[in-house]
Amino acid sequence: MSACAIIVSYRTGDALKACLAALMAADGLDQIVVADNGNEASAEAMLDAATQRDARLRVLRGQDNIGFAAACNLAARAAETEALAFINPDVILELDAIPRLLSVLASAAPAIVGGDLRDERGRSERGSRRDRLTLWRAFVSFAGLSRLGLRDFNRHTDPLPPVPVSVGAISGALFVIRSEDFARLGGFDEGYFLHVEDLDLCRRAEDASMRVLFAPGPHGRHLRSTSAANPRDIARYKARGMARYFRKFARGPLDR
């Protein structure tokens, strides 16, 4: 199955260079599309130089910072492959991660398959596998009630399954999906600027009878917090994203 890596970068810094180097060395990628939503001149020069070394790489510019969801959709439309691999610009991918994820995808059509990213200590990333997000689970998480034994929507501390398993949602930091299925879902909802668009996509996939799977790895390392974006802006976008999600999907105040 042919695959295209989709990267959205906004002031990502040195992590982007490491991410791109890993992608260019990785197995199973026929195309790499980077949506440059706004980077410093040094990063732009690095990307331009990389396009000269690897014909698979295409950089999209001129759209300004249109947000993560819209830029993902823009890059996906430029892809010419059977599958799309969405990868955050601060993820350092294992060399064989894409073939392993595509193998799971090939056996589970139609589906979204989320990867298993780890932190610098090898721990599973928070958000890599989740239950469906509901009002109750969000309240438990944000109120800190999970420390009292109540179940929130994050399941990364559960025992790692030996085989791919169905989950309520996976992380947008690393996942694969068939191009035709992504198009059938309408891509990401561009009403989200940054954050929560992955939860929305998984919820719509579930409603469309598509499987949402978490594949145990590890498949790569997530550096995190590499962007120079204002943390207050990020928090605001996340809050707006949550509000949009619950306006679309909440089934009442007792939604569990």
Image: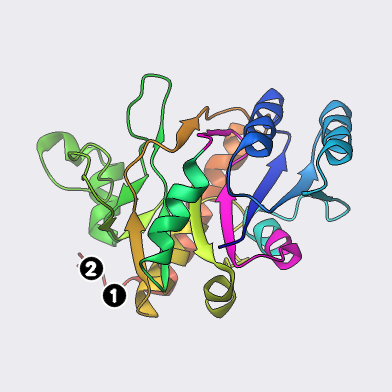
Residue at image x 73%, y 34%? Answer: 11
Image-based side of 100 in relation to 132, left or right: right
Is residue 62 placed above or below 17 in the rendered structure?
A: below
Residue 229 percent location from the top left of the image: 67, 34
Front-most of residues 95 and 79: 95
Is the residue under label 2 in contact with that under label 1 (CB below 8 Å)? yes
Q: Quadrant of residue 79?
A: bottom right
Observer-nearest of 121 and 102: 102
Q: Position of residue 41 (x, y in %)?
A: 89, 30
The spot of residue 88 in percent (x, y) is: 58, 42
Does residue 166 appear left or right of residue 12 in this picture? left
Instruction: Please tell me how crowded label 1 is: few (under 14), some (14-19), or many (20+) other residues with Cα within 10 Å.
Output: few
Q: Residue at x 47, y 66 (%)?
A: 201
Residue at (22, 40) in percent of width and height: 160
Q: Is residue 239 above or below residue 156?
A: below
Tag 2 secondary structure: loop
Quadrant for the C terminus, please: bottom left
Helix, strand or loop at disc 1? loop
Q: Is residue 91 magenta?
A: yes
Disc ID at residue 251: 1
Instruction: Tell me the quadrant of the picture where the N terminus can be found.
Output: bottom right
Boundaries of the magenta span:
74-95
| Residue 247 horizontal/vertical position (percent) | 43, 70
Colour scheme in use: rainbow
Q: Is residue 231 visible?
A: yes
User: Which residue is tagged 2?
Assistant: 255
Tell me the CA gap for discs 1 and 2.
5 Å
Count of numbered circles on the image: 2
Q: Is residue 196 visible?
A: no
Residue type at mark 1 is: Arg
